[in-house]
């Protein structure tokens, strides 16, 4: 049986959980799959998980793990895993997992394979694929030693929308564990974010990005019109944000955000590598640039060598039809 | 403000070959003397040891052999012994091989190394001795008592770009030491301050520098055997510029490819990075690199001036070692072994001084005496005039260098030295007189093919440099001359001599041409601090941990 450890905060599921369920379903290939959800008062999130095509959803309830602590989660999950005795435990490779999973695996003296991007199924000898040397190589890792083995799936390795839904909701069962609150050495405080980002470009499905070719702040409206017509977010390369024509949080690239929308339209962006690393994962890239030799055309799926001030209004007019 | 303080016996500022050799030697001395262990601390601005280390590099193992006699057993990462030396003079498309390798460039018995890996290894030895190495902590300010150095203040953390404290603000700590050893590398920011306060260069020739640029390449198998060392002079430089290219074969089909240019060029529109790119278009280099892949980039200034530019390296409570003390042999293109040797000598002096309870300048002067009777003198004194001779041009320089080999460097008197930044001519003087057209951008600009040649931004990306964006700009430009006088006189040469695209003149609506400093691109090479013709740029360390990541370089 494969056990997926779901992640929630304040009853809200982390979306990487669904990616992990999708990956685990492929790995299970029809064998039993159970989702465990640690926390306190997580009934609603459990009901949401029950929509997935799994054998059952088990909530691991204890008031001591209402807020996350590595000690609390390790104690609770150790008991739950012992009771459920899975052959494999799969977790999303989130910050929280990175915090407690090594401790949990070490406590149980079991193998842990982190940051997995795929697998080569072969029963007990299934190899898990993980990047090495900053992604320059990938390694096939076959965990050794007694079960269960622990595996964490990298964010984005599997697609949440491919998680199979069951014909009827899976049964939800509560499992109570006893965690000694006094043995928890960490005292969580209210979570905070240093800088609140008003816009999360990584969630945008379409992005229109502008670069130096836009020339002046007064021309930003040209790009904005296209963004409105496409229902896209407006973003920019570094010089535009440096000049203050768009706020910093809309900067794409190595010193800004990394995005992978379905559609990325690059207007007047030359394609310096610092920008490209932030958007090369986009599904479809459309580039408009005057300079036909601009490096942006090397990553673009559709390229238009021409003046964006002629081309963009034409696209907007066409979209309006 | 409450600052943490730390009291140590010896503080070493900078974890490069000089600083780490000093730390290791101190550990050895106290073991030999079986005395009460000294408290020793090493500060390093990089987040990890070795990350800001950049050199060719060919290592002369003489100092290593003295410091760590069993370096082979201890697993010193010496990539390959040098097997072959070749020296060429390049014309635009042709090459002339020197019939014999000029003696200073004979590398038999030396090793091709990655200085990054070598320093990481040295740091391991230092830490095994129980010495505290503080990575991510730059020396940001001097602690002085009159003319005496009493320690160093580390950099503050958590200051935003407007100078306001961020939530995670942490003030720098005051580290007080009986002896502070400045091992900051070329143009150290604290060393520069010491120069100013204590007139350390009084009676010496002005310091002289070059800039080295380097790319690490992965080549198709079998292209270049490990341990092959190729040096070249000539193209793309003109006779008025000093410098040349290097190619060092490394194991696993890697090669270090680089170019060094004297920071005393005359043409204000000259661009060292463009010269490096042009060098790679020469058939000698291009045939080697074609089909390969550039994997890493870096740039670093180096002290070229030699014997007559070595400053006073001692003061009350302080010593200066390595590149900070201008200890580099520009004829042999080597300084690592001299840096290590100076670190060892400084350690010996500091150890004796602390045991004697006297760390005054009079006592620490022993260090300079040791320098002047050591292998360092034996190496640098005979070539004391050579670099200066090149200021008369390439051919006179070569002739003088050849002659000095025969005479042991004898000449009637010291040849005069000039500060390199003074050599840069104004656009009107340089182009006006000859009637040549003034080029639009760099006079030696090249259109990169993005296979063998690259633009600066692409190279900067491959330096791995990173800085927190929300911090004060660490390149202080103390003037408003940029968009007025400098544009007119020199055409803003900062845009060209900076190898990392830090300086950019942009047109701001309503304000006209303005200098924009892309501080987060900085690779800590110090060239701007050195070459700016008005001497109005001061490089200060950014927040600790920022900077390039020279893995394997």
Image: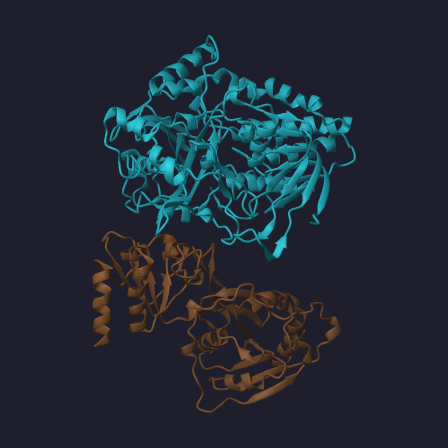
Question: Which is more toward the observer, A168 or A227?
Answer: A227
Residue lying at the far top in this picture: please name it.
Answer: B412
**Location of the N terminus of chain A (image quadrant):** bottom right
Residue in the image at 38% along x and 66% along y? A260
Residue lying at the far bottom in this picture: please name it.
Answer: A168
Q: Does residue B318 appear left or right of residue B220 in this picture?
A: right
Colour in which the image shows chain A: brown
Residue in the image at 48% along x and 12% along y? B408
Question: Which is more toward the observer, B507 or B284?
Answer: B507
Q: Is residue B464 visible?
A: no
Question: Which is more toward the observer, B150 or B492?
Answer: B492
Question: Which is more toward the observer, B318 or B337?
Answer: B318
Q: Is residue A207 visible?
A: yes
Numbered circles on residues, count:
0
x and y, in percent, of residue B137 in the image: 60, 45
x and y, in percent, of residue A271 in the image: 32, 55
């Amino acid at each position: 049986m494969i056990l997926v450890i779901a992640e929630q905060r304040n009853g809200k599921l982390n979306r990487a959980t669904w990616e992990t369920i999708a990956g685990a379903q492929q790995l299970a290939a029809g064998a039993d799959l159970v989702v465990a959800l640690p926390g306190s008062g997580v009934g609603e999130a459990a009901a949401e998980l029950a929509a997935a095509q799994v054998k059952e959803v088990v909530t691991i309830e204890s008031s001591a793990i209402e807020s996350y602590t590595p000690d609390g989660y390790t104690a609770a999950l150790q008991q739950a895993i012992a009771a459920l005795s899975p052959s494999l435990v799969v977790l999303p490779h989130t910050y929280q997992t990175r915090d407690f999973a090594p401790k949990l695996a070490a406590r149980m003296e079991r193998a842990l394979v982190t940051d997995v991007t795929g697998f080569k199924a072969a029963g007990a000898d299934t190899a898990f694929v993980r990047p090495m040397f900053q992604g320059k190589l990938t390694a096939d890792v076959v965990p050794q030693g007694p079960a269960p083995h622990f595996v964490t799936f990298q964010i984005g390795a599997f697609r949440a929308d491919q998680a199979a839904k069951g014909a009827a909701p899976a049964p939800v069962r509560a499992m109570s564990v006893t965690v000694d609150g006094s043995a928890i050495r960490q005292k969580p405080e209210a979570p905070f974010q240093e800088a609140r980002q008003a816009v999360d470009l990584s969630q945008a499905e379409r992005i229109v990005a502008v670069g130096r070719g836009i020339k002046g702040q007064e021309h930003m409206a040209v790009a904005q019109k296209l963004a409105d017509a496409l229902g896209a977010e407006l973003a920019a390369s570094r010089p535009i944000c440096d000049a203050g024509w768009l706020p910093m949080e809309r900067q794409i690239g190595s010193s800004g955000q990394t995005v992978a929308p379905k559609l990325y339209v690059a207007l007047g962006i030359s394609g310096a590598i610092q920008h490209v690393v932030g958007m090369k994962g986009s599904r479809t890239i459309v580039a408009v640039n005057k300079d036909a030799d601009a490096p942006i055309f090397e990553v673009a799926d559709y390229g238009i060598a021409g003046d964006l001030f002629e081309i963009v209004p034409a696209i907007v007019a066409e979209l309006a039809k | 403000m409450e600052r943490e303080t730390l009291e140590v016996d010896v503080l070493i500022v900078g974890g490069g070959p000089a600083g780490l050799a000093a730390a290791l030697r101190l550990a050895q001395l106290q073991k030999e003397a079986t005395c009460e262990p000294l408290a020793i601390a090493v500060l390093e601005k990089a987040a990890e040891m070795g990350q800001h280390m950049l050199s060719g590099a060919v290592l002369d193992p003489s100092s290593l052999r003295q410091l760590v006699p069993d370096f082979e057993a201890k697993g010193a990462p010496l990539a390959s012994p040098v097997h072959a030396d070749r020296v060429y003079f390049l014309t635009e498309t042709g090459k002339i091989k020197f019939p014999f390798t000029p003696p200073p460039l004979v590398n038999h018995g030396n090793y091709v190394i990655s200085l990054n890996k070598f320093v990481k290894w040295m740091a391991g030895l230092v830490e095994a001795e129980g010495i505290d190495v503080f990575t991510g902590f730059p020396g940001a300010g001097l602690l002085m008592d009159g003319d005496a150095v009493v320690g160093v203040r580390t950099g503050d953390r958590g200051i935003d770009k407007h100078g306001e404290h961020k939530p995670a603000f942490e003030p720098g700590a005051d580290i007080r030491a009986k002896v502070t050893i400045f091992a900051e590398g070329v143009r150290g920011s604290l060393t520069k301050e010491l120069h100013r306060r204590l007139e350390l260069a009084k009676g010496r020739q002005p310091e002289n520098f070059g800039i080295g640029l380097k790319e690490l390449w992965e080549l198709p198998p079998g292209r270049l055997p490990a341990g092959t060392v190729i040096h070249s002079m000539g193209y793309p430089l003109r006779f008025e510029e000093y410098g040349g290219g290097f190619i060092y074969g490394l194991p696993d089909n890697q090669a270090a490819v680089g170019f060094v240019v004297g920071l005393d060029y005359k043409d204000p529109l000259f661009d060292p990075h463009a010269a490096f790119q042009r060098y790679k278009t020469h058939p000698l280099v291009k045939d080697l690199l074609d089909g390969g892949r550039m994997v890493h980039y870096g740039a670093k200034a180096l002290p070229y001036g030699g014997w007559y530019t070595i400053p006073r390296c001692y003061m009350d409570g302080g010593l200066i070692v390595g590149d900070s003390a201008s200890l580099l042999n520009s004829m042999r293109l080597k300084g690592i072994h001299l840096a290590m040797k100076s670190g060892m000598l400084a350690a010996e002096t500091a150890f004796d001084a602390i045991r004697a309870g006297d760390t005054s300048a009079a006592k620490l002067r022993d260090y300079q005496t040791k320098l002047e009777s050591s292998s360092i003198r034996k190496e640098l004194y005979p070539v004391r005039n050579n670099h200066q001779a090149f200021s008369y041009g390439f051919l006179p320089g070569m002739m003088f260098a050849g002659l000095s080999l025969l005479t042991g460097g004898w000449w009637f008197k010291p040849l005069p030295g000039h500060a390199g930044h003074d050599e840069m001519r104004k656009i009107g003087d340089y182009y006006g007189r000859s009637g040549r057209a003034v080029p639009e951008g760099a006079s030696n600009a090249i259109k990169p093919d993005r296979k063998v040649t690259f633009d600066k931004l692409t190279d900067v990306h491959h330096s791995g440099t990173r800085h927190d964006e929300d911090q004060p700009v660490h390149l202080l430009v103390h003037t408003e001359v940029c968009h007025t006088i400098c544009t007119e006189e020199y055409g803003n040469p900062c845009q060209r001599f900076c190898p990392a695209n830090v300086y950019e003149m942009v047109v701001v609506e309503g304000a006209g041409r303005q200098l924009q400093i892309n501080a987060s691109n900085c690779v800590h090479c110090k060239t701007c601090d050195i070459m700016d013709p008005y001497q109005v740029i001061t490089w200060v360390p950014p927040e600790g941990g920022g900077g390039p990541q020279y893995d394997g370089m």
